[in-house]
């Protein structure tokens, strides 16, 4: 698609996460998309959190009156402030339920088309009720109303598009567009530093399986910890896992890590957020990246691992099969899931066994793993560039004006 400038168009982009406060894939997506759009689009970013000094970025801390409110109520308070500041927007573009409400209110207030990007869906994350309580009903209400009234919906994978149409049957399918997440190969790539590895407690001499993700039910970490018990004893497991959703999921993971560590050596748990350099060094030192998610619209972490030359073993769910080419850039683990929104495996023991067997297969053939890693990096650069994503996003903006 040819790059067309819409410099005379102001796009107000609404997000919970924006540097330096980025904790997940949606935040990475927004930060990279803004950089890719700015050469040809007037972008004003409205972001939750601390004051930023970047031109064209407005920040919104939680209003003092809502400092102790349920997170969903506090979010709605911020959404109202954001919407009020979008009066000069030609297009309003919201990301995640946290700002979908602001996008919808802004659309109604200022008669500006509302585009939203779907990074996840509340109906497919029912465990959020553990975190938000009654606020989960508020977040679900905000999201549903926004999806049903948005002028365009961007899904980050075909799998996500199918989920949207299943979860929200009143959405007009012609208003949905698929634009993948991306990766910047200039910033993500193989890197080595023995000193950094030592500081992280990683033994570079051992075959290594590495996981990167938040401690949340959708990431499937408990299944991985059970599968790791069936890996050869020389294999090292590196868990870059923090930011638990709830005390309960943290307690479950902590117990499983302790049990695994008592039975084998080489279990390394890094519970802080690593810098990009630290993470690329940790990824480069590994043999295989694992994504055991039971819900994953696409998975930027998979692209980050591929960019560092790692084969990816991922669950065959959501958008993962659109990233990982089975037998070429990694391996897909089959899963049959309950259709109740949780993504829970129908047969958890079988899923754990299949995950362990697939990891053993990849670990057993280092040359094949290396070839898959090289193919993964090539695929990441060819099919998931941010310049391509910016072109496709601009086309959506033009379609709603």
Image (cartoon, rainbow, N blue to C red):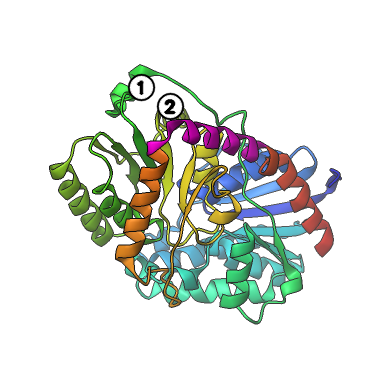
Labelled disc at residue 146: none
Question: Which residue lies at the image location 38% right of the left edge and 38% below the top edge?
Answer: 363
Count the labels in the image.
2
Question: Which residue lies at the image location 49% right of the left edge and 44% below the top edge?
Answer: 301
Is residue 262 visible to us here?
yes
Q: Is residue 361 above or below residue 367?
A: below
To which residue does mark 2 refer? 281
Ranked by sequence position, the earlier of labels 2 and 1 is 1
Q: Are marks 2 and 1 in contact (CB under 8 Å)?
A: yes
Query: Split into 4 quadrants, where in the image is the C terminus?
Result: bottom right
Q: 362 and 202: which one is in front?
A: 362
Q: Position of residue 42 (x, y in %)?
A: 76, 45
How crowded pointer 2 is (Cα within 10 Å; few <14, some 14-19, many 20+) is rated as many
Question: Which secondary structure, mark 1?
Answer: helix
Specify the quadrant of the image occupied by residue 159.
bottom right
Q: 395 and 234: which one is in front?
A: 234
To which residue does mark 1 refer? 196
Q: Is residue 38 above or below residue 347?
A: above
Q: 318 and 136: which one is in front?
A: 318
Q: Is residue 48 above or below residue 158?
A: above
Q: CA distance from mark 2 to mark 1?
A: 8 Å
**Magenta span contains residue 258:** no
How crowded pointer 1 is (Cα within 10 Å; few <14, some 14-19, many 20+) is rated as some
The magenta region covers 364-381
**Magenta span contains residue 366:** yes
Which secondary structure is most common in the magenta stretch?
helix
Q: Position of residue 303 (x, y in %)?
A: 55, 42
Q: Position of residue 1 (x, y in %)?
A: 83, 47
């Amino acid at each position: 698609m040819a790059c067309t400038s819409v410099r005379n168009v102001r796009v107000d982009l609404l997000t919970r996460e924006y540097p330096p406060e980025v904790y997940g894939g949606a935040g990475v997506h927004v930060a990279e998309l803004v950089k890719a759009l700015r050469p040809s689009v007037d972008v004003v970013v409205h972001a939750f959190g601390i004051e930023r000094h970047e031109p064209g970025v407005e920040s919104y801390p939680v209003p003092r009156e809502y400092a102790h409110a349920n997170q969903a109520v506090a979010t709605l308070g911020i959404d109202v402030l954001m919407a009020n500041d979008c009066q000069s927007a030609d297009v309003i573009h919201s990301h995640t339920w946290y700002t979908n409400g602001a996008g919808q209110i802004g659309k109604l207030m200022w008669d500006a088309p509302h585009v939203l990007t779907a990074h996840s869906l509340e109906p497919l994350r029912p465990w959020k009720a553990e975190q938000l309580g009654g606020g989960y009903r508020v977040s679900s209400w905000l999201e549903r109303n926004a999806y049903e009234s948005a002028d365009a919906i961007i899904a980050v994978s075909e799998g996500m598009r199918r989920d949207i149409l299943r979860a929200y049957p009143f959405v007009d399918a012609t208003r949905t567009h698929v634009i993948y997440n991306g990766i910047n190969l200039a910033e993500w790539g193989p890197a080595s530093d023995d000193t950094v590895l030592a500081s992280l407690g990683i033994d570079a001499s051992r075959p290594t399986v590495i996981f990167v993700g938040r401690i949340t039910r959708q990431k499937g970490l408990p299944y991985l910890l059970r599968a790791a018990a069936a890996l050869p004893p020389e294999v090292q497991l590196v868990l870059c896992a923090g930011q638990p959703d709830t005390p309960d999921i943290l307690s479950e993971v902590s117990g499983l890590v302790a049990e695994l560590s008592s039975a084998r050596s080489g279990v390394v748990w890094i519970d802080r957020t690593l810098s990009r350099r630290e993470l690329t060094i940790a990824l480069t030192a590994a043999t295989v990246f694992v994504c055991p998610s039971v819900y994953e619209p696409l998975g930027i972490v998979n692209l980050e691992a591929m960019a560092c030359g790692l084969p990816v073993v991922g669950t065959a769910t959501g958008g993962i099969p659109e990233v990982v080419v089975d037998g070429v850039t990694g391996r897909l683990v089959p899963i049959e899931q309950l259709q109740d929104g949780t993504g829970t495996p129908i047969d958890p023991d079988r899923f754990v066994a299949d995950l362990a067997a697939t990891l053993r297969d990849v670990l057993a053939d280092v040359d094949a793993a290396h070839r898959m890693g090289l193919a993964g990096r090539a695929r990441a650069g060819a099919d998931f560039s941010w310049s391509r994503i910016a072109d496709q996003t601009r086309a959506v903006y033009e379609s709603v004006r």
